[in-house]
Image (cartoon, rainbow, N blue to C red):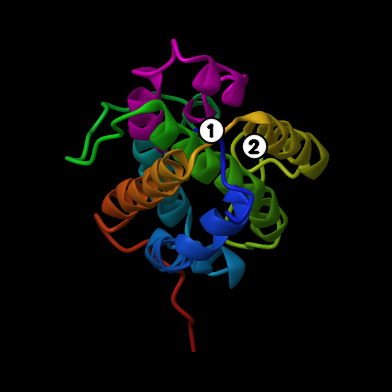
């Protein structure tokens, strides 16, 4: 069944229908410690570790549907978790929540969340340079300030999804997959608060 001409653009639906979940994840992530420049070295390590667990889980769940052309073409780049592992200088054991992705359209929603998060990481990169408590030695891979390259990835993803012939039910699954993915991220982010550097008097 073709997508209804009266149906809103899938990216409009994703933005609107996952807004609350997106806000919840941002609040749980500890990113505000980067934005206000109070994050500690320990806090940044924990921030990376929790992102590693979240991305690794979502990537593994998406990989179960890797034979689907819709998924393969939507995810043409190396796993994002490999960049985080480079920053951590090690891989961590995989931990999984009880949340699952159940079809290829839910995977499209999951990739939407991951690619969107990657764009946000470029913004955080600019703030990390202003976090005076962090040592700025070497290249960052996950929080790289290469906005142009990441914008290109995002545009490629949007172009691919825009070419898919989605029914209303397919769209519902894409949105559901994005909501589930935000829940997976929130599960990993809520393990412990990210420490900040306390003010000294």
* Horizontal side, residue 55 vs residue 82: left or right: left
Q: Residue 72 magenta-drawn?
A: yes
Above or below 25: residue 152 = above
Report which residue position mark 2 lands on: 140
Q: Which residues are magenta?
A: 55-81
Residue located 59% across and 40% down the image: 115
Indicate which disc, 2 or 1, sits on the residue closer to the N terminus: 1
Which of these two is toward me, 56 or 104? 104
Q: Residues within 10 Å of mark 2 (few under 14, many from 20)?
A: some
Helix, strand or loop for disc 2: loop
Are the residues flagged by discs 2 and 1 in contact, CB closer than 8 Å? yes
What is the quadrant of residue 131 in the picture? bottom right
Mostly what secondary structure, the magenta segment?
A: helix
Q: Is residue 85 visible?
A: yes
Q: Residue 188 magenta-drawn?
A: no
Report which residue position mark 1 lands on: 87
Q: Residue furthest bottom?
A: 201
Q: Position of residue 53 (x, y in %)?
A: 34, 37
Residue located 41% across and 42% down the image: 169
Q: Residue furthest top?
A: 67
Count the marks: 2
Q: Position of residue 27 (x, y in %)?
A: 42, 68
What is the quadrant of residue 34 in the picture? bottom right
């Amino acid at each position: 069944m073709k997508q209804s001409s009266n149906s809103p653009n899938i990216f409009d639906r994703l933005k609107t229908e996952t807004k609350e979940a997106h806000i919840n994840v941002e609040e749980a992530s500890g990113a505000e410690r980067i934005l206000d420049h109070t994050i500690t070295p320990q806090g940044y390590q924990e921030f990376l570790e929790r992102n590693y667990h979240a991305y690794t889980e979502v990537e593994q769940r998406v990989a179960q549907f890797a034979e689907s052309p819709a998924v393969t073409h939507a995810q043409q780049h190396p796993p994002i978790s490999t960049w985080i592992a480079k920053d951590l200088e090690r891989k961590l054991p995989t931990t999984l929540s009880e949340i699952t992705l159940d079809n290829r359209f839910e995977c499209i929603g999951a990739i939407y969340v991951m690619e969107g998060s990657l764009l946000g990481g470029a913004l955080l990169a600019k703030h990390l340079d202003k976090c005076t408590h962090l040592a700025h030695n070497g290249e960052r891979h996950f929080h790289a300030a290469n906005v142009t390259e990441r914008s290109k990835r995002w545009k490629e993803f949007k172009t691919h999804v825009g070419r898919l012939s989605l029914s209303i039910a397919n769209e519902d699954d894409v949105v559901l997959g994005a909501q589930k993915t935000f829940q997976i991220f929130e599960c990993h982010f809520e393990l412990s608060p990210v420490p900040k550097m306390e003010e000294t008097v």
